[in-house]
Image (cartoon, rainbow, N blue to C red):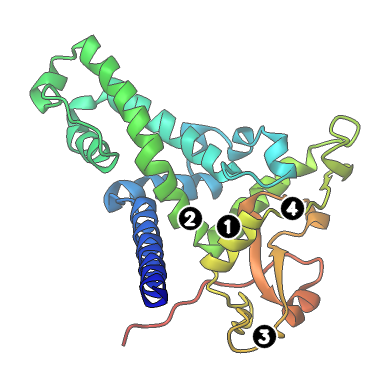
Amino acid sequence: MRTVFLAFRGLLGLLAVAAHLIFMNNTKNSLRRPMPSQLVYNYAESVYGLVQGKFEDSYGPVTEMLDDISKIARPHKESLLHDVIRCVGGLYNENAVYDYAHHWVDEARDMLRAADMPIPRWLTVNAMEKSDPDHRSALAKRVDKAFELAIVPAVFFMLFSDKTFLRDFQDRVAERVRELRRSEHPAALVRDGVVRRCVLPTWLIRAIFYRDRGLCQKCFKNVSGLDDPSAVRHVDHIVPLALSGSNDPTNFQLLCGRCNVTKGARRSDAMPTFTPYW
């Protein structure tokens, strides 16, 4: 009887392990998303150019897209960069749909496909050339939804990995922060143009650690704790709060204790690096 009980308990244990593995596999698969490279690169280039001041005639100054003070003051999963991507994409998509949709059919189909949305039969060059208002209106709604589902997170993923872009972006955010007055935003600012320090949420700390692969972004020391359990790591502001930096998720990087102390209240000058495949 005891043997049967132990066997039964062992079987339950195996089933529990199998269920956990299936759940983890399904979770990982559900997190993986297709990335239509050409579209993503095009939108990322527009956002990057805007941050550098190249496309302000078309989109307006990027600082005008940074109106959400709560996102400047505290980390949100829908970050300031998400807002800018949406503004740039929204204006671009609107012009494409209503001004030259017949030249944009392939891109629209790719966007719908990436978002796993059905492609209407009428989405053809011929139909778009006829300038059917109903079709253009329907296409605008579908493209907006597809852009939100497939393009916004993919563009964010690409730009969030580029430290040079993040530093340039936060320099523009700092321009906006310097305009803020404590008398108008006492909960967000310690003084004019300086944001209060806040406790970082666990999801952000994990994301920064994952993005930076457990390496100090200045000296590239392994601070994951796998090689040295006593390794000290800091989630550091790329543009310090004292220099009108923000608490937006795009303003953080992983540093070791030594580099964080050495950097002090200075703007990060770390450059992106890569390891050649051969």
* First reached walking from the N terminus: tag 3 or tag 4: 3
Which residue, given by chain and number where applicable, does mark 3 sit on?
229
Residue 138 image position (x, y, % from top left):
27, 17
Q: Are marks 1 and 2 in contact (CB under 8 Å)?
A: yes
Residue 245's mark? 4
Residue at 35% x, 49% y is: 40
Above or below 80: residue 28: below
* First reached walking from the N terminus: tag 1 or tag 4: 1
Which residue, given by chain and number where applicable, does mark 2 sit on?
159
Looking at the rendered structure, the secondary structure element under dot 3 is loop
Above or below 129: residue 246: below
Looking at the rendered structure, the secondary structure element under dot 4 is loop
Which residue, given by chain and number where applicable, does mark 1 sit on?
166
Mark 3: few/some/many CA within 10 Å (<14, 14-19, 20+): few
Three-letter residue code for mark 1: Leu
Cα–Cα span, label 3 and label 4? 31 Å
Above or below 218: residue 236: above
Q: Quadrant of the N terminus?
A: bottom left
